Image (cartoon, rainbow, N blue to C red):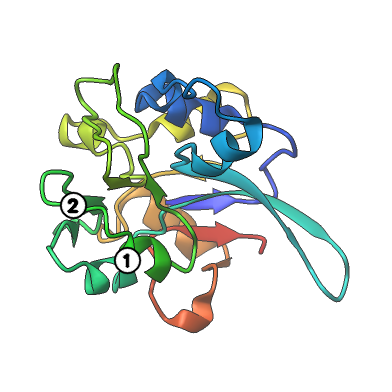
């Protein structure tokens, strides 16, 4: 995935809203009596908007942050059961059937991209099963990709709003639109110093 941060609009949450709708995250109801602070701290987020500020210039960059789908994912390394795993195509996922909720992966992730599901899920999407006591994160809309789609929900929403800041594609295919765009534009990784070789790249960082 490639994100053009120059095209990412401040205060726009189209990508976040689309992810919540696509994966049923917005179906989760706040427990009775829980205050706003606790709810906001515990509510799952598969993608969130963040602001990065350059320490020297003070310039602020807006961008979406989600699981970075690392080539060498720390979350996979620390998982004691194998619930955190990376598919052959590079998508990093969680198998909720063997996740024991230890949250080691959440501590290991330098991007704080994973959430723990504290509540029972009364309603959920058929294509995105979720369960209390499990860790979850962005899976690049794997249900869509496996069905032959070429875009994620966040990309569709960004395009619909006319921003076109997100491009999903196959990094391993040199002829894909994503690979061609990466050859044309200078891009970087968040925390490139960690040498995780992330599958999500950003321009204009």
| Image-based side of 121 in relation to 47, left or right | left
| Image-based side of 21 in relation to 49, left or right | left
The structure residue drawn at horizontal position 22% and vertical position 67%, both measured from the top left corner, is: 79
| Image-based side of 105 in relation to 195, left or right | left
The outermost residue toward the front is 33
Question: Residue 75, position in %: x, y?
Answer: 30, 66
Q: Which residue is mark 2?
A: 99
Q: Which residue is mark 1?
A: 104
Taking the image as drawn, is residue 69 in sight?
Answer: yes
Decide which of 30, 199 is in the foreground and name it.
Answer: 30
Decide which of 186, 157 is in the foreground and name it.
Answer: 157
The structure residue drawn at horizontal position 38% and vertical position 75%, both measured from the top left corner, is: 196
Taking the image as drawn, is residue 158 in sight?
Answer: no
Q: Residues within 10 Å of mark 2 (few under 14, many from 20)?
A: many
The structure residue drawn at horizontal position 41% and vertical position 59%, both measured from the top left corner, is: 68
Question: Residue 15, position in %: x, y?
Answer: 53, 33
Decide which of 196, 27 is in the foreground and name it.
Answer: 27
Earlier-in-chain disc, 2 versus 1: 2
Question: Residue 1, position in %: x, y?
Answer: 42, 51
Task: Find numbered disc 1 in the image and state the secondary structure of the residue it sits on.
Answer: helix
Decide which of 2, 27 is in the foreground and name it.
Answer: 27
Q: Is residue 55 above or below residue 25?
A: below
């Amino acid at each position: 995935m490639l994100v053009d941060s120059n095209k990412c609009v401040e205060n726009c949450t189209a990508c976040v809203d689309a992810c919540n709708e696509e994966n049923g995250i917005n179906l989760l109801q706040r427990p009775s009596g829980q205050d706003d602070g606790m709810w906001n701290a515990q509510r799952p987020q598969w993608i969130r908007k963040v602001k990065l500020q350059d320490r020297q210039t003070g310039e602020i960059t807006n961008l979406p942050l989600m699981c970075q789908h690392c080539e060498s994912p720390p979350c996979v390394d620390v998982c004691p059961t194998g619930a955190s795993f990376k598919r052959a195509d590079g998508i990093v996922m969680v198998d909720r059937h063997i996740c024991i909720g230890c949250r080691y992966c959440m501590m290991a992730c330098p991007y704080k991209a994973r959430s723990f599901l504290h509540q029972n899920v009364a309603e959920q999407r058929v294509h995105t099963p979720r369960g209390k006591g499990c860790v979850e994160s962005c899976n690049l809309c794997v249900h869509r990709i496996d069905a032959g789609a070429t875009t994620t929900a966040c990309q569709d929403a960004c395009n619909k709003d006319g921003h076109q800041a997100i491009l999903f594609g196959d990094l391993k295919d040199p002829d894909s639109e994503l690979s061609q765009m990466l050859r044309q534009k200078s891009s970087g990784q968040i925390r490139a110093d960690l040498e995780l070789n992330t599958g999500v790249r950003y321009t204009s960082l």
